[in-house]
Image: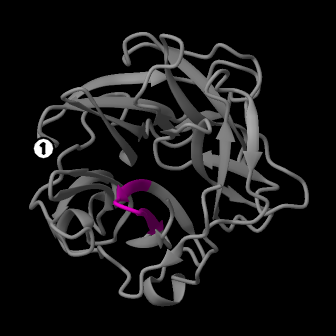
Amino acid sequence: MIGSFVDFKENPVLRAGSGFDSRGAFNPAVVKEGDTYFMLYRAESLTYDFTRRIGLARSQDGVHFAKHLAPVIVPEKDFDKFGCEDPRLVKIGDTYYLTYVGNCGRYKTGNICLATSEDIIHWEKHGSILKPQKEWDHGQVKAGAILPQRIKGKYVMYFMGEKEPWKTAIGLAYSDDLLSWYEPLDQPVLLPREGFFDSQGVEPGPPPLLTEEGIWLIYCGWAEDCVYKVGAVLFSKDGPSKVLQRSEEPILAAKDWGKTFGGIANHVVAEGLVREENRWLLYYGAADRACCLAIWEGK
């Protein structure tokens, strides 16, 4: 079982700056290439009506990050013209695949968008790859987390679907080419649980991991107080919709970062996971303002 993560003592690892991320730099996706850690993060500005962009930062130790001077993905298309939010990043072959939430505007449904890159700086947008399709997720879909390996010839993506605001579940989508996705099921594969930390809603965190035990997915869950906490679930690799094991307690408890950064108190949104020898680094957005790190000395 994925164990308990402990907050890094020198958090945060990335703060709001000036210009395009002057209001907040949070919800990070992180990959490690050689000796370099690359972070994509949601950037919000105090100007431009809080428009969301995706920024880039680099590090040689996974802790001290230097920001790219300009955002690498900006709103420009109908599917994301009001904001590019909450990146999740995987590398498959020589290509980076980035899913993000395309903000279409107030009162419109959210959608999962895809961009690809060979260098993490220059991105080609492929538009919306999954929109609300079923009764249970007709409100909006978000948080597309792609498994890098094929399962029975198909690529797998877990995503959040919403029927009512803050009442969400996790669904499953398949693809043959990573560009066109569809829902094979009429129902979600992970629901909230009454009486637990995730009794109101659940949302995928970082891209899932394929292991000997199955498919591990770290996810965020919240109760009626809408305070995000982090849990873990194990799906069968023979049937990615079948739950084998699920954490009863959070693997990372919320911390009141709101007192430090302002923003949303106790809000923890995990989106990046990196393995470093015998430990795991979990990167998360804190209070919708900064990027923080938690560590599990696992196996």
Q: Position of residue 184 (x, y in %)?
A: 65, 13
Q: Residue at x 42, y 80 (%)?
A: 8
Q: Could you say which is closer to the camera, residue 191 or residue 248?
A: 248
Q: Position of residue 252 (x, y in %)?
A: 60, 70
Left or right of 118? Residue 113 is right
Q: Residue at x 38, y 82 (%)?
A: 11
Q: Position of residue 288 (x, y in %)?
A: 46, 68
Q: Could you say which is closer to the camera, residue 101 or residue 51?
A: 101
Task: Let me know if residue 166 appears in the view.
Answer: no
Q: Please give the range of residues in magenta.
A: 272-285
Q: Which residue is mark 1?
A: 121
Task: Let me know if residue 206 appears in the view.
Answer: yes
Q: Main secondary structure of the magenta part?
A: strand
Q: Does 36 sit above or below residue 164?
A: below
Quadrant of the image occupied by residue 293: bottom left
**Amino acid type assigned to the residue bearing label 1 in the image:** Ile
